[in-house]
Image (tube, grey):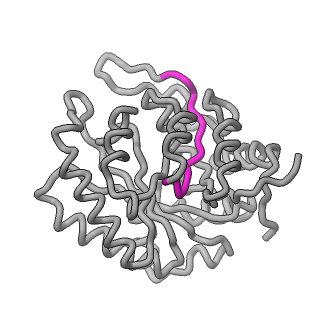
């Protein structure tokens, strides 16, 4: 198979405890992924501990960072703007180019996105302009359990924001888990996609008597690439064929204490899947 055009990175969400993240950076770097994405608060901790060069230490570029922000409560606006501004100053200084930007978790039962839409859109537009001025591109990331989860919410939100500033960072596994078709979403919003979280999904979510999700996969109902139901190759073909999209594709899998294999094994499976499709990796 011929080599693919786009470059592949990996996020660090397999390592949820800060003390484990440095080991995760090394694993991702040693596997040859082109880039890494880490949580904004994790990068702030490294910065505050005098470790702003943590990614350079392992010779892997930090390309993006995940921001989780309150996007529905006007009383927290000033606090959240100050927080994301501080994060951005730190992350740009560490080489980051993209903010993968999502809302904080909300109680989904009884949640009505339309009650919050105007504020959410205004807030994200403002945040995107602040980040642009600091040298970073904000890309909105719909996420299960947050204010923007379902297909209707994704479309309502993305159709309303100022896409001169706000890009789109779909998580294809999250979108499928939320009940939408990630292939169709990718096609419909292709022109504003700046980054993709590339994740597989186990195919079904069950809940216990208290309404809590039963994690049947050990990875929050997600799967290593190729082990789930997402049309991964179809989405890659769409992205590869749209020459204005230059990436990155950020492979992702959510770690938990109950995952059935080690994080290093999961990274190796993800790499093998992408290699088999013609994607190149770095020898370090």
Q: Is residue 281 left or right of residue 167?
A: right
Residue at the limit of the structure toward the right, as seen here: 1
Q: Is residue 237 left or right of residue 15?
A: right
> Does residue 48 appear in the picture of this structure?
no
In the image, 208 versus 279, the foreground residue is: 279
When the figure is inspected, residue 28 is found, relative to residue 252, above or below; the finding is below
Tell me the residue at 30%/48% (across/down): 160
Residue at the limit of the structure toward the top, as seen here: 209
Specify the quadrant of the image occupied by residue 42: bottom left
Q: Is residue 254 left or right of residue 240?
A: left
Tell me the residue at 44%/63% (across/down): 99
Residue 85 percent coordinates (x, y): 31, 73
When the figure is inspected, residue 37 is found, relative to residue 95, above or below; the finding is above
> Does residue 239 appear in the picture of this structure?
yes
Tell me the residue at 45%/67% (across/down): 137
Residue 39 percent coordinates (x, y): 45, 61
Residue 239 is one of the magenta-drawn residues: no
Tell me the residue at 68%/36% (across/down): 234
Residue at the limit of the structure toward the left, as seen here: 75
Q: Which quadrant: the C terminus?
A: bottom right
Specify the quadrant of the image occupied by residue 212: top left
Residue 250 percent coordinates (x, y): 60, 54
Which range is magenta?
A: 192-204
Residue 194 is one of the magenta-drawn residues: yes
Counting the numbered discs, the total is: 0
Residue 20 percent coordinates (x, y): 54, 60
Q: Is residue 38 left or right of residue 163?
A: right
In the image, 261 versus 33, the foreground residue is: 33
């Amino acid at each position: 198979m011929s080599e693919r055009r786009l470059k592949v990175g990996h996020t660090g969400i397999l390592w949820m405890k800060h003390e484990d993240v440095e080991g995760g950076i090394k694993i991702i770097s040693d596997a040859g992924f082109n880039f890494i994405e880490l949580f904004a608060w994790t990068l702030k901790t490294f910065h505050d501990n005098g470790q702003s060069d943590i990614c350079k230490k392992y010779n892997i570029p930090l390309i993006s960072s995940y921001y989780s922000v309150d996007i529905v409560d006007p009383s927290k606006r000033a606090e959240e703007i100050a927080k994301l501004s501080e994060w951005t100053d730190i992350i740009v200084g560490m080489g980051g180019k993209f903010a993968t930007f999502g809302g904080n978790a909300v109680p989904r039962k009884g949640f009505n996105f339309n009650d919050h839409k105007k504020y959410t859109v205004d807030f994200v537009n403002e945040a995107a302009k602040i980040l642009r001025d600091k040298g970073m591109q904000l890309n909105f990331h719909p996420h299960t359990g947050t204010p923007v989860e379902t297909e209707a919410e994704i479309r309502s939100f993305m159709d309303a924001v100022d896409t001169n500033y706000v890009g789109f960072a779909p998580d294809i596994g999250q979108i499928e888990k939320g009940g939408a078709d990630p292939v169709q979403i990718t096609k419909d919003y292709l022109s504003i996609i700046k980054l993709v979280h590339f994740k597989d999904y186990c195919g079904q979510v069950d809940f216990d008597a208290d309404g809590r999700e039963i994690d049947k996969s050990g990875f929050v109902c997600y799967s290593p690439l190729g082990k789930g139901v997402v049309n991964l190759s179809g989405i890659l073909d769409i992205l590869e064929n749209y020459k204005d999209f230059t990436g990155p594709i950020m492979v992702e899998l959510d770690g938990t204490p109950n995952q059935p294999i080690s994080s290093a094994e999961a990274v190796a499976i993800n790499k093998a899947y992408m290699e088999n499709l013609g994607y190149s990796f770095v020898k370090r």
